Image (cartoon, rainbow, N blue to C red):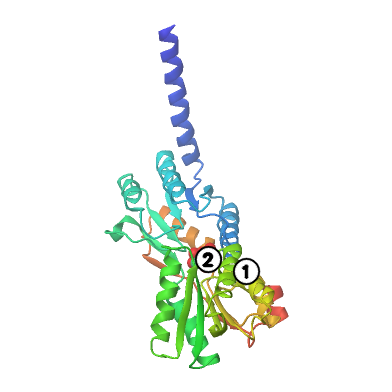
Amino acid sequence: MKKLLTIALAGLTLALASCGKTEKAAGKIRVGFSQIGAESDWRKAATVSIQEEAKKRGIDLIFSDAQQKQENQIKAIRSFIAQGVDVISFSPVVATGFEDVLKEAKAAGIPVILFDRKVTVSDDSLYACYIGSDCTEEGRRAARWVVENVGENAGIAELVGTVGSGPAIERKKGFEEIIKDHPGLKIIKSQSGDFTRSQGKEVMEQFLKSPERDQITVLFAHNDDMALGAIQAIEEAGKKPGKDIIIVSCDGVKEMFKQILAGKANCTVECNPMIGGQLYDVVEGYMRGEPIPERVESEEGVFDSKNITQEVIDQRGY
Ligand code: GZL
């Protein structure tokens, strides 16, 4: 009996091994991707780009949704390593805490491509490439728009993104870098809304009940979803969003374009989520033996009532 079991196990092992080889023989590139979740319209658009582009290119995508939890991202990356994928990519929910698992990927000889967000690590060789926006510049662009369109005096309420995330750290840094030269532009309230519409509404409701409520003349939201929630809160408080409180945010999602056209918001700094094509360009190049570039930039603009029309909205991909 024992002998029979041994032979069966050997056969199973052989079959599994050959299955792996068969897949490789079919030339399918295997990519493991850990996505943060579905916290915003921006994130959902990024997921569409990642999944649809893989399908178009015949790439075997193993996609994992971390439901906003870092431990799920670490588990997923470990699973990709165990499966022996060709490349790992992920959008880190927060910037720190990935060092160990990135060391495991490096030890396994699997390159890691950061998608959309950066990590803070002691050794930058732990990842091969960062594909995405310059969120610090997005913060600067938002502040420059305030200086140019609001002027030198404003009480600013700030809705911060996910605490510890790259975009929240960088957008705040960029915004403050510009307004430090304009002392009349003051951040008088600042709190995280975790990049979601519901929490953006809740925090804005608190701002509008605070002693400083009547000093708030500008809202800077780190993403459109929080700004959209804040618009609801401002209207429910009997104020006019886009007029009593000028609204500036980041992402450039279609719903925000509609609010700007309707006069209920004022500016959105674009952050392009449709970068699945750029990701797989790097992956396919690597599989052809080409070097992986350290950085792939995405092109973005600044949108307000001067360049948003219904036609622009109708043509917008996300
Ligand atoms: C930005 C991206 C952010 C978006 C949010 O690069 O990581 O995460 O601004 C999303 O909408 O949740």
Determine the residue located farthest toward the top in the rendered image: 1
Mark 2, ligand 1, within 8 Å: the answer is: no
**Picture coordinates of residue 26, whole percent (x, y):** 51, 41
**Is residue 38 left or right of 77 when viewed as pictured?**
right
| Closer-to-camera residue (215/121) | 215
- x then y, percent, for residue 240: 67, 82
For residue 90, above or below residue 242: above
Residue type at the position of mark 1: Gly
Residue 150 in view here: yes
The span from disc 1 to disc 2 (Cα, nearest Å) is 10 Å
Helix or strand or loop: what does disc 2 sit on? Answer: loop
As drawn, which residue projects farthest toward the left?
A: 122
Q: Can residue 224 be seen in this snapshot?
A: no
Which is more N-terminal, label 2 or label 1?
2
Left or right side of 88 for 38: right
- When the figure is inspected, residue 111 is found, relative to residue 304, above or below; the finding is above
Instruction: Give the residue displayed 46% in from the left and 70% down from the top.
Output: 133
Question: Which quadrant does the N terminus fall into?
Answer: top left
| Residue 250 point in image, percent of width and height | 54, 74
Q: How many marks?
A: 2
Instruction: Find disc 2 in the rendering and name its residue.
Output: 193
Q: Is residue 48 left or right of residue 30?
A: right
Q: How many neighbours does mark 2 have within 10 angstroms: few (below 14), some (14-19), or many (20 or more)?
A: many
User: In this figure, which residue is indicated by the disc labeled 1?
Assistant: 229
Q: Are marks 1 and 2 in contact (CB under 8 Å)?
A: yes
Look at label 2 and name its amino acid. Answer: Gly
For this rendering, which residue is in front, 241 or 309?
Answer: 241
Instruction: Locate the C terminus and report the quarter of the image it occupies.
Output: bottom right
- Is 308 placed left or right of 183 in the picture? right
Instruction: Give residue 129's position: percent from left, percent from top.
Output: 38, 61
User: Which of these two is toward me, 64 or 88?
Assistant: 64
